[in-house]
Amino acid sequence: MPFEIERKFLVRGDAWRSLATERNHIRQAYLASQGKASIRVRVRDKDGATLTIKSRTPKRRRLELEYPIPVLEAEALIALRQGSVIEKDRYIVPHMANTWEVDVFAGENAGLVIAEVELRDENERVVLPPWAGLEVTGRAPYYNSSLAAHPFTGWPDEERVALGS
């Protein structure tokens, strides 16, 4: 059974940019995000699309099932979404033994930058890069399904200021 084990951090500064080895543009939307699971459709750089089902739990380890689908079908499903379309550029940034994904959000979530690292084990130790800030693993407002319903630009100013945005 495929599981995703990850940790999420807010990103400080731009030092990571010079270390990035790859960039992809992502558009994704949620067909369902309530209850025990979320259902997401994602289009990556207009050349690939996936349908993903993830368990909704505040833990690091979550069930994740992902299936490739035709881009045209993904676009049709995006029209059936709940909430906003999430737009972001994803950068791949190697650091020590890990590969980090840094998401720079656009549109209604502009100003938010989150880094995540996937782990092989829930207790795996990770050497944090200097640009990794506050850990937000398990904090619902920072998950994409929450950002689709409650975009970052709509958060109260004091919450965004507290994050250094």
Image: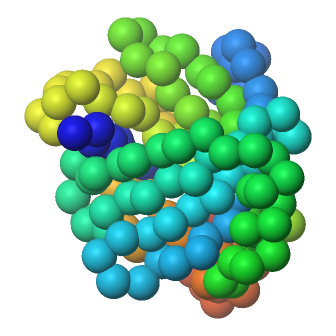
Q: Position of residue 85 (x, y in %)?
A: 76, 69
- Expressed as whole percent of the image width and height from the top left, the position of residue 128 reads 38, 28
- Would you place residue 104 above or below residue 149 in this image? above
Image coordinates for residue 49, horizontal then vertical, percent: 71, 43
Q: Establish if 63 lies above or below 108.
A: above
Residue located at (33% from left, 83% from top) = 35
- Side of 142 where 56 appears, left or right: left
Query: In the picture shown, does residue 116 fall above or below 30?
Result: above
Q: Residue at x 43, y 58 (%)?
A: 53
Query: Residue 97: horizontal and vertical position, in percent?
Result: 37, 10
Q: Quadrant of residue 123?
A: top left
Total numbered labels: 0
Q: Residue at x 28, y 38 (%)?
A: 2
Res 133 seen here: no
Instruction: Tell whether 103 sits left or right of 139.
Output: right
Q: Which of these two is toward me, 1 or 27? A: 1
Between residues 55 and 157, which one lies in front from this camera angle?
55
- Looking at the figure, which quarter contains the C terminus? bottom right
Question: Is 116 on the left or on the right of 75, as rendered?
Answer: left
